[in-house]
Image: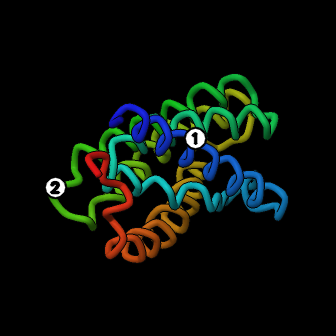
Amino acid sequence: MNRVRFLTQAAMIAAIYVVLTMLANAMGLASYAIQVRFSEALTILPFFTAAAVPGLAVGCLISNILAGGALLDIVFGTIATLIGAVCTYLLRKKSKWLAPIPPIIANAIIVPPVIYAAYGISPIWLSVITVTIGEIISCGILGMLLLHGLLKYRRIFDLQA
């Protein structure tokens, strides 16, 4: 039963990630200099459940494919999300305030060189600034609002129930 709950949670998180990314894309928020993907707020979910790690990675992969990203962007964007999710999960017992930090850092380091290599957008230092701003808005602000909203409902993530 735990495996079924784990896979169900991961699949639901992936699906919600895709829907939120497509919504941000439709609004023109997910593909420009400062990308604000509503889906990146979900990167705090590993604070609550390990199922969020594969859910976020798969959701990011599907979203990047559907958005028509370059292969480098699809691969390394997914890797950045996976690294951020794993690190958030590993830090979950330290402090809730650390939850958005790993995805912000992973994306700030990995995505700018990919934007340069895949799309020729330079200078890289400017991409570091714009990607970091977008991640702070998405993960740091929206993610922490989500985290605080979910704290009283954290039992929904319990795989033992």
In this picture, residue 159 sits left or right of residue 143: left
Q: What residue is drawn where x is 62% and y is 52%?
A: 16
Out of 144 and 12, give the one closest to the viewer: 12
Q: What residue is drawn where x is 45% and y is 41%?
A: 109
Q: What residue is drawn where x is 26% and y is 65%?
A: 96
Out of 107 and 143, give the one closest to the viewer: 143
Residue located beneath label 1 in the image: 112
Q: Which is nearer the N-term, disc 2 or disc 1? A: 2
Q: Would you identify the image quadrant in which residue 2 lies?
A: top left
Q: What residue is drawn where x is 64% and y is 44%?
A: 123
Expressed as whole percent of the image width and height from the top left, the position of residue 19 reads: 71, 53
Q: Is residue 120 above or below residue 36?
A: above
For badge 1, the amino acid type reads Pro
Residue located beneath label 2 in the image: 93
Q: Is residue 80 above or below residue 26?
A: above
Determine whether the residue tagged by mark 2 lies in a helix, strand or loop. Answer: loop
Q: In whole angstroms, how far apart are the C-alphas of marks 2 and 1?
A: 30 Å
Q: Which mark is residue 150?
A: none
Out of 70 and 154, give the one closest to the viewer: 154
